[in-house]
Amino acid sequence: MQRAANSLMLVIIGFSAAVCLAVLVKIGAYAEEIKGSLTPEPVIIDAPRGRIFDRYGHLLAGTDEKGNRYYPAKLCSHLLGTLSADGSAQSGIELAFDEELSGRPGYTNGLETQPPVRGADVYLTIDSKLQSAAEKILSTAARRYDEGVRYETDAPYSGSAGAIVVLGCRRGEVLASASYPDFSPETFSEDYSRLLSDERFPLLDRVTSGLYRPGSTLKTVTAAAALYKGAIGADTSFWCGGHLYLGGSDFTCMNTHGYTDVRRALEVSCNLFFYRAALALGIDRLVEYEKLFGLGKAPDYELPTLAGQLASPDTLDYWSSGQLVQAAIGQSVTEVTPLQMAGAALMLADRGRSYSPSVVMGVGSRNGRSLEKEPQTELPDCGVFDIIKDGMVSSTKYTYGEFALSQLDKPVAIKTGTPQSPRGYDSAVIGFYPADYPEIAFAVMLEGGANAKHTVYEIIKAYTEQQPS
């Protein structure tokens, strides 16, 4: 009897313990639910935006401890691009590499913290000192344009707006990319309405999106096409009497040059020679070589660029021999960007090899991307580029005074242009330096001004001062 009572007691005790354990488990579960419901919402911690540096590690864009973007060098506004008031990338490198620059946000919820990961740094091929010199040249040109200059006395360069591009030879890296007028990225949001209504279009990156007639700078490409296709030879001469009557129209030259070969025609920029060369060449073969030189198509570049257009029966409803001769000297409806013309100058410098331009050297480290690349185009080197170079070097004798290119230690090759435009005339120059074993190629466009050729001395001085002796 006692044994049965003890067994019953043990059953009751075991049952009670099981009930208590179940209750405790349930209470624990409720406690976890309550605890979870009391956990605060996580607070997002913004990631510091990656920095942007030039080729030598000089800071172009950074982020302060409050998350505000700042630009200590005050350079490359169009190239670097802009952020909106809420920090969203809108243009330039800021937009093209937004994913890399943005990093990974962190969070905290009071119980744990996940720190943010800073965005990757982006290193550009830009040379800050050369960039600064290019921007100063453009602002000086605009100041002179506004003040008025006497070209017959000191022949200064001037222009209401413009662009300068400098490329490194054999790789096509962008050493300078200057567009004027520009703006301050730091105050872009506050200034936006004013910038948008400014008739000088300061938001336009003229390097990649400014479309211009190339004028006589295109004669270098016409010369290459005519020589390669056998329309002319190195010793072919055409008579320049100042006028060519064609289809009832009078096509003129700025001077009378007599019998002129291609070297002399490039030196003195003889229209008549290139009119006759184009008539022998034909538009199809001219356009073929313009495309080989990177014109009429957008270059493969890290940022958006315009393709422009080439004068041809495809772009004009009415085609004639008159349109052909105008196309040969960079007129008619031909439109190019300064970046494209710098690329054409690079192809002249590299003797028929063309490379796509690059402006980003690395992401995460300075050597994060390889700039070694195969040429996009490679023409056979059969003496054509020596002929063109000779004419371009000879044309430097027409630079004067403080801007004279004869002051340089080594020869430079240039070709000037004075294309017709809505402003009357623009002024352009392309070229490369040194003429032998070139290191840089460049293009300059000044709107409504003159003597772009006189910017070349200052560009080259700024470049050579950066190089080890």
Image: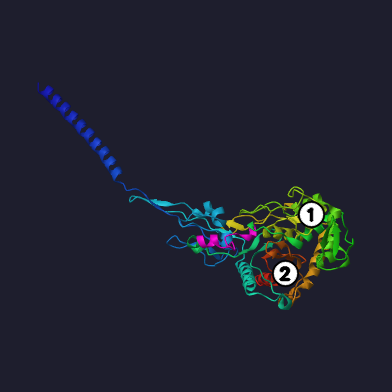
Rendered image quadrant of residue 406: bottom right
The magenta region covers 192-208
Assign a secondary structure to mark 2. helix
| Residue 398 in magenta stretch | no
Rendered image quadrant of residue 30: top left
Q: Which residue is mark 2?
A: 453
- 336 to the left or right of 82: right
User: Horizontal and vertical percent for residue 111?
Assistant: 33, 50
User: Horizontal and vertical percent for residue 70?
Assistant: 49, 64
Q: Residues within 10 Å of mark 2 (few under 14, many from 20)?
A: many
Q: Nearer the viewer, residue 110 or 223?
A: 223
Q: Nearer the viewer, residue 4 or 387?
A: 387
**Mark toward the viewer: 1 or 2:** 1
Image quadrant containing the N terminus? top left
Rendered image quadrant of residue 240: bottom right
User: Horizontal and vertical percent for residue 462?
Assistant: 66, 71
Q: Which residue is mark 1?
A: 323
Among all residues in the image, which is located at the extreme left? 1
